[in-house]
Image: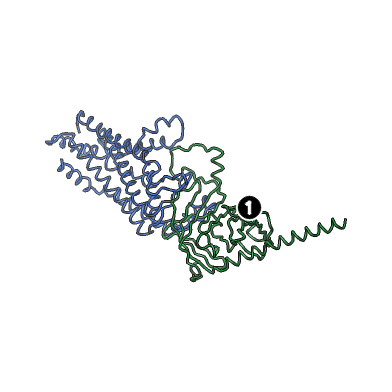
Chain colours: A green, B blue
């Protein structure tokens, strides 16, 4: 019996150590991201939403610590998922007001990652839960799934290139839920009824949207004025 | 023939009534532009209400290109009346004034006379469209600037890049001109049968209203008729503002979703023009002019 209790105590302390390890891991990733005070980058943005026909657009992306983010299409119109794209890794990853729990491992894009669940301790937080897939050897977040109160769940998958040492991705794919879009034909003055009824598979596909941004020409820590983000 | 055309053009533009259409178009367009300049944001918010739940839209939506599209949607339903005012008066007006018999006694054929009159009414129609284009497109571009064009269809939205819009407007205005010339041809045809302008003008508008209702009602019994009604095809100018997407759902810049529909509609309108003008010539050549 004493041996049994000793083994149980050892297991509990081991799992406690695991939880602390997750906070330490998240802290290390955050520290890597904190090297970047600000950046601007060129991007190609592709919108893949069933009810939107949009060409690939050239955009400029700006970020300033701690959470200022701006995506701009010069002289044009950009379509972004509500509440999603403005969030980047630096704002998602925080070790204050969150509890970081281990949730296993997974392979993302051929990289072994540790799954970390970030739960907010603040009841009023907009974020309900964030799941991070962290590439521990490189201290990079390969994937993040965030559930919010107002804007549903969205997923970000990152791939890295020349700026991996700053934790800045080369490509980000945002996946998010979409609502049905419909305008009365009386408003749009469309009177030909060429619409074919959708299959169930197509209806399910239409519920998801994706925005892909491929970044290039990062300019890091050159200084961006706060007024730029107003 | 050219002299005849010049005379008919002189007769059209000598009358004050001709300029009613130009003034009406200018008044309508400037009022809409004023309203959108003052309160365009509220209108944009109204348009974006449905899509705003999923997407955030950043950029200048209320720009000259979108405003021109909105005005074309509104005005191209009403411009036919302004076209009919002149076209439906071409023969019946002469009969009303008692100058028709005098005209056909001149040393040119009835066919030449009718073609000259129809050509003159076509020039009037085209000038009206040019006026519409200058005010609706160029003036809007000057007041509101340009940018990407964000269009909301009933079941999807289309985002056209700024450099992919202007040629579409050129095509749309050419098509709209064809549609309005069809209305002019109908008015011209009805003008043969009357000795008073009011009758053909009202008849032209009544036909357009009647056919438009048939074209827009989604009742199966009428669906067989729709392809043959010119009003069904008059709104095909909007096809210039739809774009194809590839397998990855990327819009293909410079493409049109359904170019064949534009071609088919243009052919139907041309057939109607030939039919109305040909019918006018044939009937007028056989008609005993007593006025």
Query: Would you identify the image quadrant in which residue B61 lies?
Result: bottom left
Q: Quadrant of the N terminus of chain B?
A: top left
- Estimate the x, y position of residue B44 in percent, counting from the top left: 47, 55
Chain of residue at mark 1: A
Farthest residue, direction right? A1
Total numbered circles:
1
Can you tell which quarter of the image residue B259 is in?
top left
Please tell me whether residue B272 is drawn above or below residue A133 in the rendered image.
above
Q: Pick whichever, A5 or B222, lies toward us.
A: A5
Q: Is residue B17 visible?
A: no
Disc 1: which residue: A106
Residue B126 position, x and y percent, is 27, 46
Q: Quadrant of the C terminus of chain B?
A: top left
Position of residue B56 in the picture relative to residue B88 (left or right) = right
Judge by depth and name the residue closer to the eye, B168 or B178.
Answer: B168
Q: Is residue A53 visible?
A: yes
Residue A3 percent location from the top left of the image? 85, 57
Residue at x 36% of width, y 32% of height: B228
Residue B152 horizontal side relative to residue B120, left or right? right
Q: Residues within 10 Å of mark 1 (few under 14, many from 20)?
A: some
Residue B277: x and y in percent read 25, 35
Where on the picture, by quarter, is residue B265? Answer: top left
Q: Secondary structure at mark 1?
A: strand
Query: As rendered, which of B121 and A188 lies closer to the eye?
Result: A188
Q: Residue at x 84, y 55 (%)?
A: A4
């Amino acid at each position: 019996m004493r041996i049994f209790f000793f083994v149980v105590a050892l297991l509990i302390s081991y799992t406690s150590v695991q939880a602390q390890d997750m906070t330490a891991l998240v802290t290390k990733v955050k520290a890597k991201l904190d090297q970047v005070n600000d950046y601007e980058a060129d991007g190609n943005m592709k919108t893949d939403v069933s009810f939107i026909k949009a060409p690939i657009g050239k955009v400029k992306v700006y970020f300033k610590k701690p959470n200022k983010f701006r995506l701009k299409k010069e002289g044009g119109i950009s379509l972004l998922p509500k509440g999603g794209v403005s969030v980047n890794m630096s704002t998602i990853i925080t070790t204050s007001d969150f509890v970081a729990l281990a949730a296993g491992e997974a392979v993302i894009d051929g990289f072994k990652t540790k799954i970390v669940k970030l739960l907010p301790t603040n009841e009023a937080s907009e974020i309900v839960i964030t799941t991070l897939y962290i590439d521990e050897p490189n201290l990079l977040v390969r994937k993040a799934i965030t559930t919010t109160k107002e804007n549903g769940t969205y997923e970000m998958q990152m791939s890295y290139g020349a700026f991996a040492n700053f934790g800045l991705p080369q490509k980000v794919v945002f996946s998010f839920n979409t609502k049905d879009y419909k305008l009365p034909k009386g408003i749009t003055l469309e009177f030909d009824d060429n619409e074919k009824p959708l299959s169930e598979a197509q209806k399910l596909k239409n519920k998801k949207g994706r925005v892909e941004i491929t970044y290039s020409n990062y300019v890091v820590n050159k200084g961006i004025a706060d007024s730029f983000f107003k | 023939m050219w002299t005849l055309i010049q005379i008919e053009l002189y007769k059209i533009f000598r009358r004050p009534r001709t300029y009613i259409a130009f003034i009406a178009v200018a008044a309508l367009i400037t009022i809409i532009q004023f309203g959108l300049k003052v309160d365009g944001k509220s209108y944009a918010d109204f348009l974006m209400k449905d899509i705003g739940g999923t997407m955030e839209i950043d950029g200048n939506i209320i720009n000259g290109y979108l405003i021109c599209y909105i005005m074309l949607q509104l005005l191209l339903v009403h411009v036919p009346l302004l076209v009919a005012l002149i076209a439906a008066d071409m023969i019946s007006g002469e009969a009303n004034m008692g100058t028709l018999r005098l005209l056909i006694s001149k040393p040119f054929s009835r066919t030449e006379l009718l073609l000259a009159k129809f050509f003159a009414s076509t020039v009037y129609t085209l000038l009206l469209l040019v006026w519409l284009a200058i005010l609706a497109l160029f003036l809007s571009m000057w007041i509101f600037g340009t940018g990407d064009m964000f269009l909301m269809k009933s079941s999807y939205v289309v985002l056209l890049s700024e450099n992919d819009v202007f040629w579409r407007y050129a095509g749309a205005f050419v098509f709209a001109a064809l549609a309005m010339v069809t209305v002019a041809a109908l008015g011209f045809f009805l003008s043969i049968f009357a000795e008073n302008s009011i009758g053909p003008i009202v008849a032209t508008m009544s036909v357009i209203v009647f056919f438009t209702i048939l074209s827009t009602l989604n009742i199966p019994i009428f669906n067989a008729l729709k392809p043959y009604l010119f009003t069904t095809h008059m709104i095909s100018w909007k096809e210039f503002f739809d774009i194809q997407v590839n397998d990855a759902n990327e819009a293909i810049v410079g493409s049109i979703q359904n170019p064949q529909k534009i071609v088919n509609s243009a052919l139907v309108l041309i057939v109607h023009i030939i039919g109305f003008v040909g019918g006018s010539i044939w009937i007028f050549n056989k008609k005993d002019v007593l006025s």
